[in-house]
Amino acid sequence: MNAHEYEVGLHKMEIDTPALLIDLLAMEKNLKTMSDFFKGKEARLRPHVKLHKATPILAHKQLEAGGTIGVTCAKLSEAETMAKAGIKDILIANQIVGARKIGRLVNLAMYSDVMVAVDSYTNITELSQAALSKGVQLRVLVEVNIGHNRCGVGPEKALEMARKVDASPGLRFMGLMGYDGHCTRCVDVVERETCSRKANQILAATKKKIEKSGLKVEIASGGGTYTYRYATQIGGVTEIQAGTYLLMDTTFRESGVTEFELTLTVLATVISRPVRDGVKNLAIIDLGRKAMHPYYGMPEVKDPEGAKVVGMSQEHGKVELEGEACDLKVGDKIELWVRDANDTINLYDKFYAIREDIVEAVWDIPARGFVT
Ligand SMILES: Cc1ncc(COP(=O)(O)O)c(C=O)c1O
């Protein structure tokens, strides 16, 4: 029996803390909402698995839900993890640079259909030489800057780069990638829509221009959980890289993404109820910044009502209590919503998959902490 099997069947309040929990009923709703959305659409979903650090069972659930074409990764190590889990169609939505990584990439291309983004001629030459030396055909997308101002060539330079990829032995030009990440910062939902439409129109127009020159552009990949609705309305965009829709967090929810359920919580334990001058109704929990990422602020408490996190140090959380929450004792559990799913998941080795308060499964997060 592996250690996890002793935990299956526990009530969630019996789990040792801090622990990262997924509400399966809510997650299954999210899978259905997204696959229903893609029914009858020209574009397909290529879920971004950086959200859950390439957890195989979650990636397989996303692919099985329908409307999907493959997975998106941020890191080469995530792509390797996905290939090990039997997933073939993998996009690394990033530049893979340097001899060591390129060596790993072409090895990966020997047993998966990995695809990578480029935005520099030096990188294209290095990829081509490495692919040739291994005898593989590496699939390549030219990344276009559609306003996010991170990676990517200007749209006016994409045709020349596409030609270079097409002419490079060992490489197969598949199309374009352009991420409308700058639109996620729009607080107003109408502004976000305008921003995303404009960005994805640039991607679609660039695709058209390259096709006119005679090159085949099979893929135009972009979008995310904030913008999939708008990006899919732009003819020519062939796939969407949304990830957070699966598990969600309170930051996405508060920024207007309301069609998906919150699924992720962290369970913590009250380790102290300090009694000293000037301190009233305070609990200290075993949850600090190493167990809940604070980038977007303090997490909200799901249960009990009346508890509010007012500070987090590395290993401790300070919780102010009101009403019923004042009854919390040392040893009691408290459950908190995750404010930043991507960064918090990266802090954990495993997910507890919970159905109606009972542990149904424990899933390892194999690529957690993989930074290369
Ligand atoms: C390249 C790329 N594509 C897509 C996404 C969208 O992910 P999400 O759906 O989690 O917002 C991101 C998020 O950072 C990204 O960097």
Image (cartoon, grey):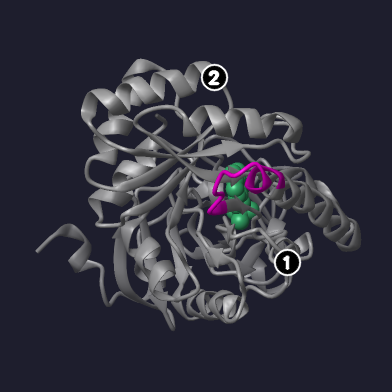
Q: Is mark 1 within 8 Å of ligand 1?
A: no
Residue 258 lies, in percent from the top left, at 73, 72
Q: Is residue 24 left or right of residue 207?
A: left
At horizontal 31% and vertical 23% (from top left) the residue drawn is 130
Of residue 10 and residue 148, the one placed in the foreground of this image is: 148
Residue 251 lies, in percent from the top left, at 71, 56
Q: Is residue 322 left or right of residue 245?
A: right
Q: Vertically, is 69 above or below 125?
A: below
Tell me if residue 273 can be seen: no
What residue would you read off at disc 1? Answer: 257
Q: Image quadrant of residue 189?
A: bottom right
Q: Mark 2 or mark 1, which is nearer to you?
A: 2
Q: What is the crowding at mark 2: few (fewer than 14 residues within 10 Å), some, or many (at least 20)? A: few
Determine whether the residue tagged by mark 2 lies in a helix, strand or loop: helix
Determine whether the residue tagged by mark 1 lies in a helix, strand or loop: loop
Residue 150 among those drawn in magenta: no
Q: Is residue 290 left or right of residue 127?
A: right
**Distance between the alpha carbons at the discs numbered 2 and 1:** 38 Å
Q: Is residue 72 left or right of residue 101?
A: right
Highlighted range, magenta: 209-219
Instruction: Give residue 121's mark.
Output: 2
Residue 332 lies, in percent from the top left, at 48, 64
Q: What is the crowding at mark 1: few (fewer than 14 residues within 10 Å), some, or many (at least 20)? A: some
At horizontal 69% and vertical 49% (from top left) the residue drawn is 298
**Amino acid at pointer 2:** Tyr
At horizontal 35% and vertical 69% (from top left) the residue drawn is 14
